[in-house]
Amino acid sequence: MKQATQKKIAQFLGFFLLRACLTIVLAVLLLFLYDIGRKGGGAISWEFLTQAPRKGMTQGGIFPAIFGTFLVTLITAILAVPLGMCAAIYLNEYARQGRLTRLIRLSIRNLSGVPSIVYGLFGVILFVNIMHFGTSVLSAGLTLGLMTLPWTITASEEALKTVPNSYREGALALGATKWQSIRTNVLPYAVPGMLTGTVLGLARAAGETAPILFTGAAFFLPYLPKSLGDQFMALPYHLYIMATQHHQIEQVRPIAYGTALVLIVLVLGMNMTAVVIRYRLRRKRR
Amino acid sequence: MNVETGIAKIETRDLDFYYGPTRALKRVNVSCYKNRVTAIIGPSGCGKSTFIRTLNRMNDVIPGTRTEGKILIDGHDIHASDVDVVELRRRVGMVFQKPNPFPKSIFDNIAYGLRINGLRDRRKLEEVVEKSLRRSALWDEVKDRLDENAFSLSGGQQQRLCIARALAVEPDVILFDEPCSAIDPIATAKVEDLIETLKKSYTVVIVTHNMQQAARVSDYTAFMMLGELVEFDVTEKIFTNPANKLTEDYITGRFG
């Protein structure tokens, strides 16, 4: 009897602690979003979203930064998505599972934890200096792509692992080749998960500053990038400048908040897209 | 151990199988006759499933495994260099322990094997799907809902779907790896009836945990223990007058 009461108290305390933790996390997050929404909301206007900065970036909009972020994320996606998915398919389906494969997998996991500034410096050496792409949207996109790859590979491999082995064996037992069994009986069920992980990785890349800092992002450009060899403005870098580097920092504060809001909405939008893709594909399968 | 002068569809000769350093099959010699049902019985871990999976080289996909000795199907060594393992698996169909329908429609499940072999003609596909479902005695239950997901079927129906799926690619041998261990007694009875019908057109090999099932459905029975074939004979003889003391102990329930 006494033991039963104790067990109930322990359960109550446990649940209480878990709820408290969740509440704290949510409260901080909501407070943060509310603050940015309140202070940045006023800056948002059609002009803000579609015009270039004017008068030493104290007026005008942030269109070049939005455009630049889209462009650089697109390049990131072109590098990281197909390469990441194919590498994951190879690792999970074809590679002999031995010590070497485990080492490779461990290295990939570790790479996803490497600070982004390290990728930035690596990008400078590899793309800007050795490959002579210059400080450009191409170099920046490729650098972000490298940074995103470990995430795409890991997420895609996890997605492949959720497909039961009986689908693979069942197909093989009917006279399918290995590739046929993967293409028709594994990938269709793994792709929603692969895409979700990938888009989340891209959303993270879109918000990064350090990797593009030395590889192609510009403080201010009076024109939009016309080729992959041009420099570009990007939302996270623009935000960094407006928040810390501008000479009239008080005056541009609303612009900084507005930029932050746009960036958050963009990243949130990409994450929502991932959720929608997953939901749609799952439903289609039913 | 050669028991009868029938046409041996499958013959294993001194078959050894290794998972890495572990020897899972030791010099197994079994013959499976055409239009007969051969049951493999034995306690858990005796190598029954390993044995049946060597017959369509399904074990090849497990890394670190090795086969020694010979497996002849229609007199041809299935490990010979000119054997296409993909074609072998089409000819030697397999039904697994747990029903493994694919998350597709009932129709697409049955059509899967035909489509991967390049058949696109819708009418021909429909024909084969109907024929296969009729053969597995599932047609009347599903004919009005072929577009529904196969997961909507009951466990027993799912297993008959898997049998229909295996039949659709027109194999000559069907391997059953404990096909009834995950389904209820009524569904089991249906699958057993089905096996009885199937042997008219196919060579059937079935691994089973259930000795009554082996006695009911099979013509020949192989009793295995610890990777070795203890006794192989006509089913009736195994269950009424086994030659080996171990077989007798096992079928009378003294261990296992």
Image (cartoon, helix red, strand yellow):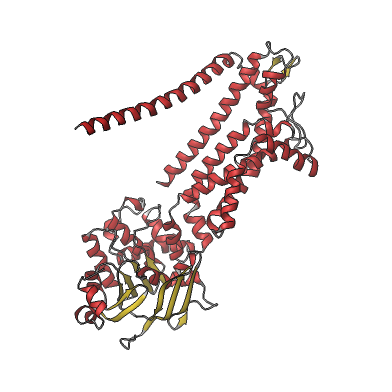
Image quarter of the N terminus of chain A: top left
Q: Which of B118 and A12 is in front in this view?
A: A12
**Residue B37 picture quarter:** bottom left
* Residue projecting furthest to the top: A251
**Residue B179 picture quarter:** bottom left
- The residue drawn where x is 70% and y is 25% is A64
User: Picture coordinates of residue B249 (x, y %)?
Assistant: 22, 75
- The residue drawn where x is 62% and y is 30% is A207
* Residue projecting furthest to the front: A2
In this view, A141 is above or below A85 = above
Q: Is residue B170 visible?
A: no
User: Picture coordinates of residue B134 (x, y %)?
Assistant: 30, 64
User: Picture coordinates of residue B137 (x, y %)?
Assistant: 27, 64
In this view, A75 is above or below B104 = above
- The residue drawn where x is 53% and y is 20% is A32
Horizontally, residue B212 falls left or right of residue A135, namely: left
Horizontally, residue B110 falls left or right of residue A110, namely: left
User: Picture coordinates of residue A71 (x, y %)?
Assistant: 67, 34
- The residue drawn where x is 40% and y is 77% is B26
Q: Which of A49 and A254 is in front in this view?
A: A254
In this view, A260 is above or below A154 = above
